[in-house]
Image (cartoon, grey):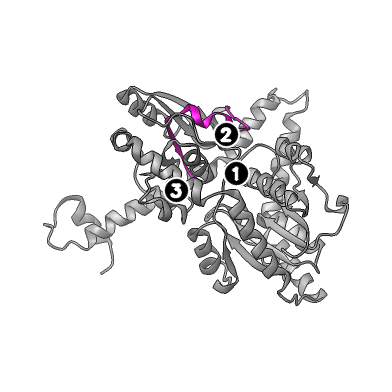
Amino acid sequence: MAAPLRILITNNTLAKPAGTELSTLDYSVSLRQRGHEVAAFSAHLGEVAQRLRDAGVVVVDDLDQLPWRPQLVHGHHEWETTLAALRFADVPVVSFCRGPCNWQEAPCLAPNVVLWAVVDDACRDRLTERHGVAADKVELVLNGIDLSRFRQRATPVSSVRRVLVFSNYASEQNYLPTVRAACEVAGAELVVIGSAVGSIHPRPEEILGDYDVVLAKGKAALEALAVGCAVIVCDAPGLGPLVTEENFDSLRRISFGNPCMTETIDVAGVSARLKEIRPEQITRTTERVRATCGLEQTIDRLEEIYSRALSTPLNVDAVGQAEFASRFLTEKTQAYKLGRKTQEFWHDQREPDAPDEMDAVKVDRVLDAIFNAEAKHAKLMARLDKAQAQIEKLRTQPSVPPRGLAARLRSLLPG
């Protein structure tokens, strides 16, 4: 870019290391290295916030604490982006969508949002089809990896000995027992890292190279590929493919996410994926990732989008901004009230004289269960889609003799 910018990046939380939190860290540090001034805003600070501060990035949980006025807002997550858009009504905003389903990832529609950015095609469809965003206002920014951190392992994978499930949603209550059984069949050791099992590693680049195979989705899958692991796309919604040089581009366009995790997670399916692994294939895929998915390429793309945003005229007036704020707050009223009730519950149960003597750890587990319900919902929706496809198949096969369950299903369907 022609001149350094003052950029404000918003995020849902800056607490535990996770996908968007770590992307915020990567973007902030890289942009600072290019001479930009960067600040990060979230109401929920923690470990990631400290890592940002250690890297020289300004971090605030109150927008009035910013030491300067931003020239551009790079907004992750609807709520936080909207707060910044309302606070800096005369500043252009680029609203990012990094998930096709999560409520937090809904786009900000404030009048001063001039562009929207997505990390994959599913997010693009969400913006254009569900939220009415014009297609020519949506920019694609594929995920990139800091290759200086995620170094390629010294020894290429030669066999399946150690398998890692790398997910904040994996638990003994969903698909872990199935993966464990498949690993036992393959004679491989299984390790699980993720918040649902109480095992979080803040710096995955330090341990990914210790595993031959990684089961993951999203950016975690891309990180494992960059290191040189074999990757099977798999998480709570279902089982996806083994990533290969041939399917890499198409899988990256959907962020190794829900659209490809269409199969039921069973022992036979996981075992089949493990048997597909070939050392030479892993090497070729890793070489492709390291040649095309570097973080520097992503930052180049961000700077292009910032330039376009800054050259787009802002047409914002006080009445329009006030009308948007009213609509936004009306829509979020029930969520706000539910959040307040949850907050009161959390504080009440932390009191020493709480009637059921729940300690802070138990309360946090309850709240984690609430937040992890999103993963369960995604899994149920995937099952529903599969069931609907099976029903449609039955409905469109008139040659099948009309007996048994198939006949009953047809009798209930229109047409």
Q: Answer with mark 1 or mark 3, whichever residue precedes in sequence.
A: 1
Disc 1 and disc 3: Cα gap in Å?
Answer: 15 Å
Determine crowd level at label 1: few under 14, some 14-19, many 20+ residues with C-alpha closer than 10 A: many
Q: Nearer the viewer, residue 33 or 338?
A: 33
Contact flag, marks 2 and 1 (Cβ < 8 Å): yes
Q: Residue at coordinates 77% horizontally, 55% vertically from top-left?
A: 36
Q: Secondary structure at mark 1?
A: loop
Asked if the residue at tag 3 contacts the one at tag 1, i.e. Cβ–Cβ closer than 8 Å, the answer is no
Q: In the rendered image, which quarter is residue 264 located in?
A: top left
Looking at the rendered structure, which numbered label has been put on residue 288?
3
Helix, strand or loop status at disc 3: helix
Measure the C-alpha gap from mark 2 to mark 3: 19 Å
* Mark found first going from the N terminus, 2 or 3: 2
Residue assigned mark 1:
146
Q: Position of residue 98 (x, y in %)?
A: 57, 54
Query: Which region is colored magenta?
Result: 199-217
Asked whether residue 89 is drawn in magenta, I would say: no
Residue, disc 2: 205
Answer yes or no: do the residues labelled 2 and 3 have beta carbons within 8 Å?
no
Q: Quadrant of residue 389?
A: bottom left
Task: Check disc 2 and give the amino acid type.
Answer: Glu
Q: Is 331 on the left-hand or right-hand side of 391? A: right
Q: Residues within 10 Å of mark 2 (few under 14, many from 20)?
A: many
Specify the amino acid type for callout 3. Answer: Arg
Going by the numbered disc 1, the residue's amino acid type is Asp
**Mark 3 surroundings within 10 Å by alpha-carbon count, few (fewer than 14), some (14 through 19), many (20 or more):** some
